[in-house]
Image (cartoon, helix red, strand yellow):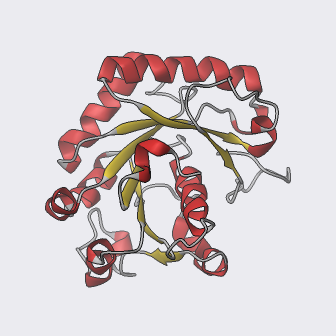
Amino acid sequence: MVPPETAGQRIVIFAGRFGSGKTEVSINYTLLLANKVNGSRPILIDLDLVTPYFRTRELVGRLAEDGVEVVTPAEVAQHLDTPAITPQILGALQQPTRPVVLDVGGDAQGARALGQFALVLEKLGYAMNFVVNPYRPFTDSVEGIVQAVAEIQGTSRLKVTTLVSNPNLILETTVDMVVTGHRLVEEAAEALGLPVAFVSLRADLAAQLTSDTFRQPTLSLKRFFVMPWEHAEGDATP
């Protein structure tokens, strides 16, 4: 099931600080759309200009096999602070039927890249999720989360509409850590006056939960990116 807080919008944005896991969340969410019965083939736009290890554009072929079209900035523009608005990205946003997911870096560079499309997105409508990992620097307190949201809103000129809770320490994550970290995300959501769209967590951890563990829907994550020094196999979240 598509998490209800974002299901009403054709265009869904995922932004987040480095280490938030927003690229894995973006990919898994898009695959969820691709697997919907009678769903249109979704488009995943890669606007993450910062993260050197986790880039959706590296998975273009693999995602295409699963029914996802990946749109990336032009090759030259990938190396600029704010890539130029390309007809391909604008066309993906403006087509009226297929769902679109944007993977956006949560720092100033990523927000500026997103801000180039602010007028178009305001006209078309969107849901903007800020992915929070409360076990990462700068988002490990309510104050830090509130500040991070304010920064991306100010630079992108777009409003964050929901938070996504993604508490993890990669392979060291336990169910108790997810539950404890999620409480902090809920506190931040209350301070911001925003809903939490869903909780994302490793598939093996999701299998250990009961139906009433969280008030929000959950998204089980399959891991697509592994750091060079990791040798573990299986599902996890970055």
Q: Is residue 149 left or right of residue 46?
A: left
Looking at the image, is 158 positioned above or below residue 90?
above
Q: Position of residue 28 (x, y in %)?
A: 61, 57
The reply to whether residue 95 is visible in this rendering is yes
**Is 200 above or below relative to 12?**
above
| Front in this rendered view, residue 166 or 40 | 40
Q: Nearer the viewer, residue 232 or 191?
A: 191
Closer to the camera in the image, 104 or 188? 188
Q: What residue is drawn where x is 65% and y is 75%? A: 66
User: What residue is at 24 percent from the left and 55 percent from the top?
Assistant: 112
The x, y position of residue 18, in whole percent, is 48, 43
Q: Residue 136: percent from the left, percent from the top?
A: 54, 30
Q: Position of residue 48 (x, y in %)?
A: 42, 59
Residue lying at the far front of the rendered structure? 38
Q: On the rendered structure, is 123 left or right of 212? A: left
Q: Taking 233 as reference, is 116 left or right?
A: left
